[in-house]
């Protein structure tokens, strides 16, 4: 049996990194279904070559070899690590980190390989990220505000959001494409689905709006018109139905992994709504 454990990032990275993780595969290869989150990810097999997974707009299937240990980091939308290109050039791509960080990747690969435990390897990766963000060009603050406004808990019209940010709709689209890798509308749809997953994985109880409960109620709470709307979006973003993705239960994913380190900060945005 393999294992997957998510953890909060070190406090210094909390503003840019949503979660970090350690994954072990068992005695057989593991079929991993990567889902769109709105952000980029770093996947670092211990003893192997690290990759950057660009912003995803649909599911991406990867077969991870047996007896592999991976440490990784998932970034908030609009807070990717320093890269030599804009993110809309990296959509739905996997690139070797050496292609992007030529000067420092070899040292990082060696340091990760020499780490005594996966937990130590994860700390090494985060320590490597810290100076990169300290020395980087500041993130686009208007895009950061847009990301918060596009969270599912406060549905907003894209044109209204652009006006609120003193941008034209085309300016907002261009800045989101560069900093996030997707248009504001695509990001909104992605975050809405992430909101549903967060509610489901947290075992949240539906609010009962429109007299619905269970999965249908959570769909409405996340901003969907109804459960059928959720099902269509889930198929588009993940390739499977909601019940297929969650294993038929609303309090765990099909693989039984604990995703609390990922969904807790996401759900925290529900309590600090951005009014537009």
Image (spheres, rainbow, N blue to C red):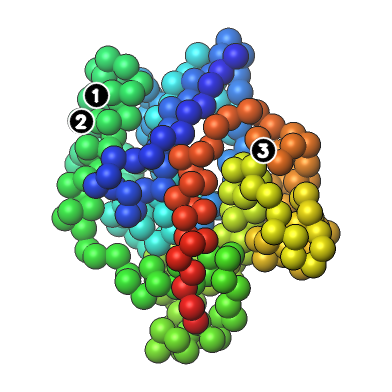
Which label lies toward us, 3 or 2?
Answer: 3
The residue at 65%/28% (across/down) is 255
Query: Disc 3 marks which residue?
Result: 251
Label 1–label 2 contact, CB within 8 A = yes
Can residue 238 be seen?
yes
Query: Disc 1 marks which residue?
Result: 110
Task: Give the number of callouts.
Answer: 3
Label 3–label 1 contact, CB within 8 A = no
**x and y percent of residue 223 in the render?**
67, 66
Disc 3 to disc 1, C-alpha distance? 39 Å
Q: Residues within 10 Å of mark 2 (few under 14, many from 20)?
A: few
**x and y percent of residue 206 in the render?**
71, 54
Question: Is 35 in front, or is 198?
Answer: 198
Disc 1 to disc 2, C-alpha distance? 5 Å
Vertical position of residue 24 compared to residue 103: above or below: above
Quadrant housing residue 245: top right
Query: Disc 2 marks which residue?
Result: 107
Quadrant housing residue 73: top left
The residue at 21%/49% (across/down) is 132
Question: Is 137 in front, or is 148?
Answer: 148
Vertical position of residue 255 compared to residue 28: above or below: below
Q: Of label 3 and label 1, which has the lower sequence position? A: 1
The residue at 51%/27% (across/down) is 4
Q: Of label 3 and label 2, which has the lower sequence position? A: 2
Disc 3 to disc 2, C-alpha distance? 41 Å
- In this picture, residue 190 sits left or right of residue 164: right
The residue at 30%/25% (across/down) is 121
Vertical position of residue 173 compared to residue 247: above or below: below
Can residue 233 be seen?
no
Question: Is 89 in front, or is 169?
Answer: 169
- In this picture, residue 135 sits left or right of residue 185: left
**x and y percent of residue 67 in the render?**
50, 14
């Amino acid at each position: 049996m393999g294992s997957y454990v998510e953890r909060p990032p070190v406090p210094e990275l909390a503003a840019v990194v949503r979660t970090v993780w350690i994954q072990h595969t068992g005695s057989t290869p593991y079929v991993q279904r990567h889902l769109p989150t709105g952000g980029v990810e770093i996947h670092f097999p211990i003893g192997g070559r690290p990759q950057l997974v660009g912003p995803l707009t649909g599911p991406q299937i990867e077969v991870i070899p047996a007896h592999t240990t991976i440490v990784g980091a998932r970034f908030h939308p609009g807070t990717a690590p320093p890269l030599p290109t804009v993110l809309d050039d990296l959509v739905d791509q996997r690139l070797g980190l050496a292609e992007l960080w030529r000067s420092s990747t070899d040292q990082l690969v060696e340091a990760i390989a020499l780490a005594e435990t996966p937990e130590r390897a994860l700390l090494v990766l985060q320590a490597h990220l810290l100076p990169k963000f300290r020395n980087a060009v500041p993130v686009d603050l208007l895009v950061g505000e847009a990301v918060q406004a596009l969270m599912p808990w406060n549905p907003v019209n894209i044109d209204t959001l652009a006006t609120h940010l003193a941008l034209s709709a085309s300016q907002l689209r261009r800045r989101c494409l560069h900093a996030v890798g997707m248009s504001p509308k695509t990001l909104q749809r992605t975050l809405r689905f992430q909101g549903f997953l967060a509610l489901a994985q947290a075992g949240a109880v539906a609010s009962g709006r429109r007299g619905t409960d269970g999965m249908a109620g959570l769909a409405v709470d996340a901003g969907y018109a109804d459960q059928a709307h959720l099902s269509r979006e889930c198929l588009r973003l993940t390739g499977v139905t909601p019940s297929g993705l969650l294993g038929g239960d609303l309090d765990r994913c099909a693989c039984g992994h604990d995703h609390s380190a990922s969904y807790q900060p996401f759900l925290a945005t529900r309590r600090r709504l951005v009014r537009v």
